[in-house]
Amino acid sequence: MHRLHIIGGKNHGKTTLIVELVQELTKRNVRVGTIKHTHHRHELDVPGKDSYRHRLAGAEVVGILSPSMNAVFMPRAEAAATRDPYEAFAPLFADCQCVLVEGDVQASSPKVEVWRAELRTPPLATSDRSIMAVVTDDAPTIAAARLARSDIKGLADWVLAMFSPTLR
């Protein structure tokens, strides 16, 4: 699974950028998948519901099939913490030509940062040399490439160039 992580501080515009990129890429007939990464611990399944009870009973994986949406709940075992946590998702994203991940600064996959000067936090790229580019309409002092936030078509072109081997 080829991923691009969209990272940045709180309220810098990660979700908005991903939504706009997905819209632009799908207009171009690119099959896009997305993953939201979070460090917060919270229950994804509703306590008391059947699927939740199935998991508590010991099911390794619990699936939900409905007329409008499907979901799979699988615990993240402690042993899996040493492996790439995205491995479990790879089969589900096999038909995607690119996968955009919101968050996960620690990822080893390519990363771009969304940054806004008005929020007065320094760009992560000033201290993290693994960030390939900063998406902003401001002018930070950074070693990484700067991509114009206001040019979503140009950003989509850049993303497509990143994923060009998978788009053939």
Image (spheres, rainbow, N blue to C red):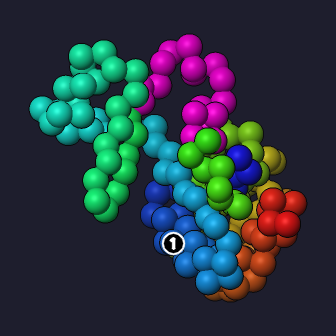
Residue 140 x/y as whole percent: 72, 69
Specify whether 122 is left or right of 10: right
Q: Nearer the viewer, residue 19 or 126?
A: 19
Circle 1 sits on which residue?
A: 19
Kindly identify the residue that appears in the image at 75 percent across and 83 percent down: 154
Q: Judging from the image, what secondary structure is the residue with disc 1 in?
A: helix
Which quadrant of the figure has residue 83? top right
Query: Image quadrant of residue 4?
Result: bottom right
Residue 14 is left or right of residue 82, and the answer is: left
For residue 80: magenta? yes
Neighbours of disc 1 within 10 Å: few (<14), some (14-19), many (20+): few
- Residue 15's place in the image compared with 77, above or below, is below
Q: Please state the horizontal and vertical placement of residue 147, each as a whole percent of the image.
A: 75, 75
- Kind of residue sitting beneath label 1: Val
Residue span colored magenta: 74-90
Q: Residue at x 78, y 71 (%)?
A: 160
In the image, residue 40 lies at what x, y percent?
A: 39, 37
Which residue is more in the foreground, 79 or 139?
A: 79
Pick the quarter of the image with the C terminus.
bottom right
